[in-house]
Amino acid sequence: MMTEEHEAAANPGRPKGVPVCRRLSRSAVIFLLLALSGLIFLWRKILTLENLSYNTASMLFQPQNSNHTVLAQKEPLPPYNNQTFCSHLEPTPDEALEDRALLDAIAWPKPPAPTSLNQTSDPVHSLFAILPSKGGRERRVGDQLEALVQMQDFQGRPKRYGGDFLVARLHSPELAAGVAGTVVDHLNGSYSALFPLLWEGPAQVTITMVHSSEAVAVLQRLREQRSDRFFFQSLFRSGELSETTECNMCLPHNRPQELLCNYTDLHTGEPWYCLKPKRLSCDTRINHFKGGYKKDLVTHKEALLFQSRVNIKVVIHASGPDRIDVLPKKIDDPELENRSIEPGPVKYNPSGYYYKGSWRSFDGTPVRQFDAKSITQCLTGKMINMYGDSTMRQWFEYLRAFVPEFNLRSPAQAGPFMAVDCKHNILLKYRCHGPPLGFSTVRASELRYVANELDRLPGGPNTVVALSLWAHFSPFPIEVYIRRMRHIRRALERLLARGPGTLVVIRSANLRALDKEISLNHSDWFSLQLDRILRNMFTGLAVVFVDAWEMTLAHHSAHNIHPPPDIIKNMISLVLTQVCPAKKKS
């Protein structure tokens, strides 16, 4: 055996007293440490390049696991990795508390998982019945009518749980009258539809299933997990070089080699990103436009829950009469006060109703009717600022028939638009809200957030602000809408403080025509949820609500994202009644 002395003599360059195996082991460790250090250095460089010139990115929407499966899945859900680059500030304790209360206010029952379409709600098999009045008495103006709905599945079996999305209205074609009802979910497959009796004469009950409870569960999952299902694009151009890239509030982190252009608003913190063009800088963005809808959002079984004329907006039939005759109110009836709260368990007060084609506010304020002359008189000396989506643009388009439009050569959908009457000192302005915005084309320079626009207004008794923001937010998680409304609410508080007398009008969401694709991205159920958030967040603020939800539900016209002229006229009359209230008689 060779001793250490013999090895040292044979290898005079080696250190004396160190075994060969130990020297080899130490060399290997040093080599591995150097290699690991190099890999860490390289990885940090990659991360640095990914985040260069952008704000710190964070995960806004973490993947959320549904508490249920809508259908027993033999096929997996579409694969989705909800990792996003998205700048987001954590809410303050007060904001987090409000967020929790708002989410509780819109909580919706979740159904168990059916094994097939046959076990889901079927509006054709379902029935409703008008309940008799208490004591069998005749029905009079001031009473409340109740109809009981029993949902059944496609095999005619009663449902045993709630969560179906139903809407109801009481109407009279003969009188051009209508009022929205409220639906109470008893969570056992039965529902109560409640209506106030507001006119004398015939009245007919119509109850519609918008979506089954199983379909609503799919919509909940899409809202929570697929915020990318509606996407946008921007054109970048410099000289003859141009590129188009995808944009969104939060972009999936599936292409780490791509850099992002960060267009987060510096004042409000509202995030917006585009994938950076390969050969152009972020400063060369020209416009913003709707990209389209992602496909394959649901499985084949889930798609069966969204069939036109089968389980999307189908009328539920009555098991007996669906019409009643309402008698006039008896002024000298000693039981009138008690009867006004019977027979239903809830006294439902709508915001208003139609009678002879005109909207009447339930609070008793007479809604004035305006012709061209009285509209001009009412708007004299006023500055009307309209912000929002195309449902607010409808108001501008109605009023520009009475105030000459100043051509700004703006895109027909997005604006901005202006109308001026110098003789009567009238100024009308419309501007669309900031992204997310699904218009065809908007100039990048015209992408502005409503809160920032409100902060530029001086306000005062001759200033009117009208807002309508909802239609483009339905594909996104509800927290996105809450954050946007919170910024607008704070801006309105500042405006009302510095400009006392400013009139603020907020238009709510309305119902629309639905098919499968529209349902998955812009269902009335999404709109209803946004509407509840809106009302909760602005209650207590000095604003006027125009209840577009009830005004479209109570009307005889088919549902449309852009309500017909009759409804718009009634909305404008309601607004102008607030702008120019009737003079009190001495």
Image: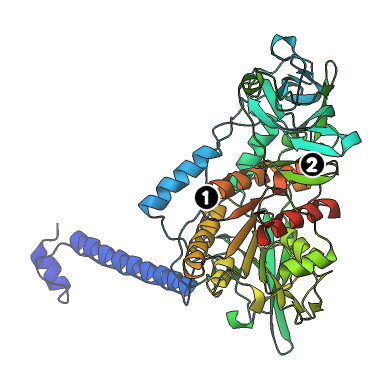
The residue beneath circle 1 is 537
Quadrant of the frame with the C terminus: bottom right
Residue 121: quadrant of the picture? top right
**Residue found at the far bottom of this picture:** 239
User: Residue 354 bears which disc, if any?
Assistant: 2
The picture places residue 398, in percent across and down from the top left corner, at: 81, 63
Most extreme residue toward the right, as rendered? Answer: 174
Task: Give the number of the mark in front: 1 or 2.
Answer: 2
Q: Identify the colour scheme used.
A: rainbow
At which x and y percent is residue 525? 68, 41
How packed mark 2 is, by other alpha carbons closer than 10 Å (few <14, some 14-19, many 20 or more), is many
| N-term mark: 1 or 2 | 2
- 310 relative to 380, above or below: above
Image quarter where the N terminus lies is bottom left
Rendering coords of residue 44 (x, y %): 40, 70
Kind of residue sitting beneath label 2: Tyr
